[in-house]
């Protein structure tokens, strides 16, 4: 298990370096005049050139990347070029909102997908058809479309929830609850049906295995077979799908946060990218990739524990 874990960590580090370099390269060739954005249209060309030199924008790409990477290794992510706030502080103010939203949505998805998927696999009939149809519909309807519908109906027309976020520094649990309910439901609805479809397929495959018939012939109860044996054997497939959905939610949360005016990582990434605030953009990318690596590592470890064959694959 130690070797298995070290291999996953090493591959995660390689991925982190590759994505960071790729992102920095894309920002370098974006064509955005960052110094002009900072100083405004009234600044002279000499002032713009001096600002570029001050920020190191006149340096070659690789030299700038190495300078940024050196700061990261020393624990310094830099400061925003537009408001002088440290990148770490800016991210820490927004990361809890995004992580809370995504974690709540993925937990709801995991619970509902497992229940629906197992019910469809065991009962079949109309439940099975509903899950399969729902999977197609869920894949066809983007989460932001549902978010707009929810805002229109439940916030604007019925007034049950605020149309925009009420989360502010020092806000209590009530503000978090009413602000995150609609976006979490919107993200869950689009993910749960496809997750249930994967759980259904995995459970059906396990129910057709010889060991299930053997357990039944020995008089083992159906409940014990399902929850002690079948669910554990089908869990790796479900965990893999959930990890992919988690990554998809981290990307999709950008639009969701814009719709609900949530002050999260997605909104920060959009504003920083439009301005060309490279330290903030790189900080968002760095944190996001680290979260993805950690989630994938945990899923790999869980799969390795559930199925030892995975450790040698």
Image: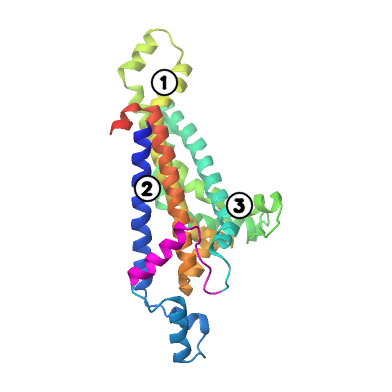
Q: Are marks 1 and 3 in contact (CB under 8 Å)?
A: no
On the rendered image, what quadrant is the C terminus found in? top left
User: Horizontal and vertical percent for residue 156?
Assistant: 64, 61
Q: For the residues marked 2 and 1, what is the alpha-carbon distance in whole angstroms? A: 32 Å
Mark carried by residue 193: none
Q: Is residue 139 above or below residue 265?
A: above
Asked if residue 134 can be seen in this view, the reply is no
User: Horizontal and vertical percent for residue 249?
Assistant: 46, 51
Asked if residue 289 can be seen in this view, the reply is yes
The residue closer to the viewer here, 87 or 151, is: 87
Give the residue drawn at x 40%, y 52%.
140
For marks 1 and 3 on the same chain, the one whose residue lies earlier in the sequence: 3
Q: Which residue is mark 3?
A: 180
SS at badge 3: helix
Q: For the residues marked 2 and 3, what is the alpha-carbon distance in whole angstroms? A: 30 Å
Q: Is residue 76 magenta?
A: yes
The residue closer to the viewer here, 1 or 274, is: 1
Q: Which residue is mark 1?
A: 229
Q: Is residue 176 left or right of residue 3?
A: right
User: Horizontal and vertical percent for residue 13?
Assistant: 37, 50
Q: Is residue 44 above or below residue 280?
A: below
SS at badge 1: helix
Give the residue drawn at x 56%, y 65%.
86
Location of residue 127 (image quadrant)? top left
The residue closer to the viewer here, 128 or 255, is: 255
User: Horizontal and vertical percent for residue 177?
Assistant: 65, 49
From this viewpoint, which residue is outermost toward the top? 218
Residue range corresponding to the magenta coloring: 61-82
From this viewpoint, which residue is outermost toward the left? 313
Q: Are marks 2 and 1 in contact (CB under 8 Å)?
A: no
């Amino acid at each position: 298990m130690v070797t298995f874990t070290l291999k996953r960590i090493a591959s995660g580090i390689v991925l982190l370096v590759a994505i960071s370099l790729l992102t920095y390269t894309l920002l370098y060739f974006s064509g955005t005049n960052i110094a002009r954005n900072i100083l405004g249209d009234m600044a002279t060309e000499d002032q713009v050139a001096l600002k570029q030199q001050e920020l190191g924008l006149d340096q070659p790409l690789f030299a700038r990347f190495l300078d940024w990477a050196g700061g990261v290794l020393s624990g310094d992510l830099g400061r925003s070029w537009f408001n002088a706030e440290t990148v770490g502080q800016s991210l820490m103010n927004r990361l809890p909102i995004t992580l809370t939203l995504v974690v709540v949505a993925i937990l709801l998805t995991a619970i509902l997908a497992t229940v629906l998927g197992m019910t469809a696999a065991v009962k079949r009939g109309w439940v099975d058809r509903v899950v399969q149809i729902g999977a197609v519909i869920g894949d066809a309807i983007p989460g932001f479309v549902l978010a707009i519908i929810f805002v229109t109906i439940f916030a604007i027309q019925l007034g049950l929830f605020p149309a925009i976020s009420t989360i502010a520094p020092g806000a209590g649990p009530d503000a978090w609850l009413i602000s995150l309910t609609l976006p979490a439901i919107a993200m869950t609805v689009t993910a749960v049906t496809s997750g249930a479809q994967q759980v259904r397929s995995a459970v059906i495959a396990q129910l057709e295995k010889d060991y299930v018939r053997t357990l039944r012939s020995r008089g083992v109860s159906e409940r014990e077979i399902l929850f002690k044996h079948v669910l554990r054997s089908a869990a790796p497939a479900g965990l893999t799908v959930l990890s992919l959905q988690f990554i998809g939610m981290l990307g999709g949360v950008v639009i969701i946060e814009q719709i609900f005016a949530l002050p999260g990582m997605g909104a920060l990434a959009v504003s920083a990218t439009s301005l060309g605030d490279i330290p903030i953009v790189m900080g968002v990318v760095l944190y996001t990739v680290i979260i993805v690596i950690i989630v994938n590592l945990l899923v790999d470890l869980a799969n390795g524990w559930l199925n030892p064959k995975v450790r040698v694959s």
